[in-house]
Image: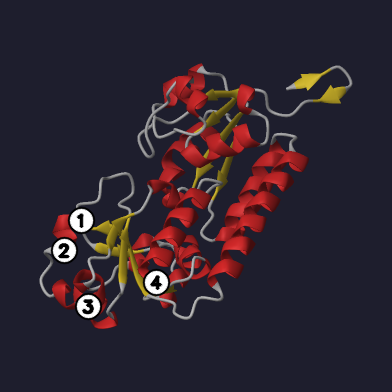
Amino acid sequence: MYGKGSIEFPQRVVCLTAETVEIAYLVGAGNRVVGVPGTAHRPPEAREKPKVGGFTTFKLDKILALEPDLVLAFSDLQADIARDLIRAGVTVLCTNQRSLDDIFRTILLIGGALGREGEARAVVQDMRDELKQVREFSSVWPDRPRVYFEEWHEPLIAGIRWVSEIIDIAGGRDVFPELREQPMASGRVVDAGEVIRRDPEIILASWCGKKVDVESIRSRPGWDATSALRAGRIYEVDGSILSPGPSVMVGLRHVHEIIQESLM
């Protein structure tokens, strides 16, 4: 949008993921958000914005009707709608974060695109400070329990890189650390027998927006031999841990509490 003698930053923003909504509000541009996905819950006032679809199911006409001058999207999962929007002449900023550092860069990128670089840097600094505090707190623990994180159950998919990093920072040891190098979910499919062999002491699960069936995990053949099941340590983790934005900190706190409790 152009004004006399100046260039303004985007004034009508449509967000296609919950974390882009959260970032826009945290950097002070929430008033410019004109459309959100149905998955948006933070902050609560964002729920009152017009809905444009789900995580992968969007209506092009709904988005275009809002006359956005910027659409914020995420990853290859939204490649089709991003393509259609670009063909319709809309500016799309699509990020592809896979690690905590990627998340920090994404916040700075979106903040910069909205003319809120200073506010974005403050958000990132707050996150870094909390990560440092948690890491220092857990670093003195005498033991680091083995942790299996399950992102999906059919097939079994281990946690994405930022989740693996969170487990380490929170005081645990990811039983599939080598898979953090796999950016796609298909590269993180694991065998049930291998989970048993690696004998996790804690099992964490968050199934991408679907409620975790803890009982079904407990009843898997042979899993009763794992230290986690023998100790009754199977937990559903707050779904925010799979949202690659500021709310991963909610997941970090939850994982940190679980691991700390297991050591008592």
Q: Closer to the camera: disc 1 or disc 4?
A: 4
Looking at the figure, which quarter contains the N terminus?
top right
**Left or right: where does residue 45 sit relative to residue 122?**
left
Q: Which residue is situated farthest in the right direction here? A: 5
Instruction: Give the mark nearest the N terminus, 1 or 4.
Output: 1
Q: SS of the residue at dot 4?
A: loop
Label 1 belongs to which residue?
214
Q: Which of marks 1 and 3 is in front?
A: 1
Looking at the image, residue 103 lies above or below residue 123: below
The answer to whether residue 244 is seen in the rendering is no
Q: How crowded is mark 2: few (under 14 residues within 10 Å), some or many (20 or more)?
A: some
* Left or right of residue 249: residue 54: left
CB-based contact (under 8 Å), mark 2 and mark 1: yes
Mark 4 in CB contact with mark 3 (< 8 angstroms): no
In the rendered image, residue 161, in percent from the top left (x then y), is placed at: 47, 64
Distance between the Cα atoms at labels 2 and 4? 21 Å
Name the one closer to the observer, 141 or 179.
141
Percent from the top left, x then y, of residue 155?
A: 22, 62
Dot 1 and dot 4 residues touching (CB under 8 Å): no
Q: How far is mark 1 from mark 3, CA to CA?
A: 16 Å
Residue 196 numbered tag: 3
- Of marks 2 and 4, which one's residue comes earlier in the chain? 2
Q: Distance between the residues labelled 2 and 3?
A: 12 Å
Give the mark toward the camera: 4 or 3: 4
Residue identifier under label 2 = 218
* Label 4 to label 3: alpha-carbon separation: 21 Å
Q: Name the residue under label 4.
A: 263
The numbered mark at residue 130 is none
Of the residues tagged 2 and 4, which is closer to the observer?
Answer: 4
Tell me the amino acid under the disc marked 2: Arg
Does residue 42 appear to the left or right of 233 in the view shown? right
Q: In the image, what residue occupies the spot 60% across and 60% down?
A: 131
